[in-house]
Amino acid sequence: MNKYDGITNEFIEHIRSTKNLSPKTTTAYFSDLKDFNHYVCNEEINEETVVKYVSYLMDTRRLADSTITRKLIVLKMFFAYLHQKDYIDKNHYSNTFKFKRGKRLPKTLTKKEVCAILDCVNKRFEQSNTETAKWKNARNLALLDILICTGIRIEEASNISLSDIITSEHTILIHGKGRKQRLIYISCQETWNNIT
C-alpha cells in the first residue's frame, strides 16, 4: 500500500464535503490521485515531482491535454491540502508551473450537412398538423438556426428566454458560463425571422 493512499481518501472526503463537485468529478479526481500515487510510489514528493509526472503523462502515456489539465487541477488542490495539514513542509506544486494546452479548432459541420439539417427541420415545420407541433418545430428551427449562425454553446441556446430577445436591435442576450452575459447580433434576416 502506498503511503499517500490513506491521505488521498481523507482528501477526497474533504473535497466531497466542502466543494460543490458532482459525484462524477469526485470519482475522476480520486482516480487521478490514485494514478499519481502509483507513479510516485513511496518516494518523497519534491519540487520536480509534478514536472516529471507531466512529462510522463505526455511522453510515455500520451494523454490528451484536457486529461492532463484535469489531473493537474486535482494535484494542485491535493498539494495545498498536504501542506495545510502538515503532511509536507512545503507546497511543492509551484505557482510558476504552467501547463499550456494545445489549442485545437472545433469540429464544424460542412455546408451540405447544415443545409440537410435545416431542410429536415423546415419540412417538419411545414408538415405540422397541430398548433403544438407547429410551435415545437418552429422553436427547434429557431434554436438550430441560432446555434449554426452564432456558434454559441447548446446550454447557452437552451437558456434563452423571450425576455432575452431584443427585437428592436436584432440582438439576443446570452447567459454564458460563470454568470457572464453578452449580446449577439443576428445579421441574417432569415435567421431573425425564424426566431421571431
Image (cartoon, rainbow, N blue to C red):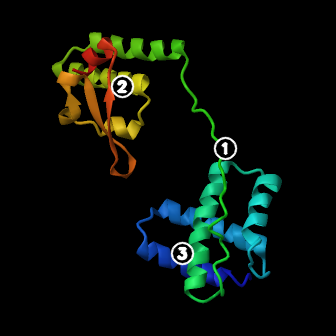
Give the vertical position of 191 relative to 9 (above or below).
above
Q: Is residue 85 above or below residue 13?
A: below
Instruction: Give the residue at x 32% y 22%.
Output: 186
Residue under pointer 3: 12
Which corner quadrant holds the N terminus? bottom right
Q: Which mark is residue 102?
A: 1
Q: Which residue is mark 2?
A: 146
Residue at screen point 62% across, 50% down: 66
Does residue 127 appear anywhere in the picture? no
Quarter of the image with the C terminus in it:
top left
When asked about the image quadrant of residue 110, the answer is top right
Q: CA distance from mark 3 to mark 2?
A: 41 Å
Q: How many marks?
A: 3
Give me the residue at 16% from left, 19% from top.
Answer: 131
Amino acid identity at mark 3: Ile
- Tell me residue 179's x, y (percent): 33, 50
User: Mark 3 or 1 closer to N-term?
Assistant: 3
Give the residue at the far right of this rendering: 60
CA neighbours of label 3 inside 10 A, class few (<14), some (14 to 19), many (20+): some
Q: Give left or right: position of 189 versus 99.
A: left
